[in-house]
Image (tube, rainbow, N blue to C red):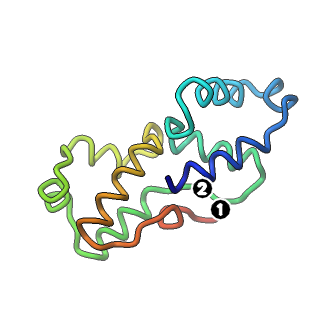
Amino acid sequence: MFIEEEVKKLYDKITDEEFASDSKLRYLKNKINKHGLLYVNVSELNYLYAHSGKKVIYDLQLLKNLLHNNGIGYTSIIRKIGIPKATLSKLLNSDRNVKLLQLNVLFNRLNKVYNLNIDKNTIKREV
């Protein structure tokens, strides 16, 4: 999975002292230990990046722009991929609760159906 490796690298660099002093990091550690890396959402991934000092974030607006520039609309995606409209809207309009697992599935389907080359860098930008 494309983002999973990146999350693991960020997560592995966090020291025990950092986990002890930051309640959000403790929450993420428990979540990752309980559910796995793919259940981290985009805003949590961005928090890990900010904590690590890297000046990048994941921004789903970049994916929306790519789809728009290729003439791919919601209706086409819903028909060809078979994803419910509400789910697609959530994935493309909300960074907060979109899990990495959901992004991986969406990216794989978009790549297969539309012959796109979407990867983690598609939605990554420097801040």
Q: Residue at x 47, y 64 (%)?
A: 119
Q: Nearer the viewer, mark 2 or mark 1?
A: 2
Q: Residue at x 36, y 70 (%)?
A: 66
For this view, does 105 lie left or right of residue 11? left
Residue located beneath label 1 in the image: 127
Q: Is residue 66 above or below residue 24?
A: below
Residue 124, given in percent of the width and then of the height, sits at 55, 62
The residue under label 2 is which amino acid type?
A: Ile
Residue 61, picture quadrant: bottom left
Q: Residue at x 35, y 58 (%)?
A: 108
Quarter of the image that includes the C terminus: bottom right
Q: Is residue 57 above or below residue 90?
A: below
- Who is closer to the viewer here, 25 or 108? 108
Total marks drawn?
Answer: 2
Residue located beneath label 2 in the image: 57
Q: Are marks 2 and 1 in contact (CB under 8 Å)?
A: yes
Label 1: how many Cα within 10 Å (few below 14, some 14–19, many 20+)? few
The residue under label 1 is which amino acid type?
A: Val
Secondary structure beneath label 1 = loop
Residue at the outermost bottom position: 70
Residue 60 - label: none
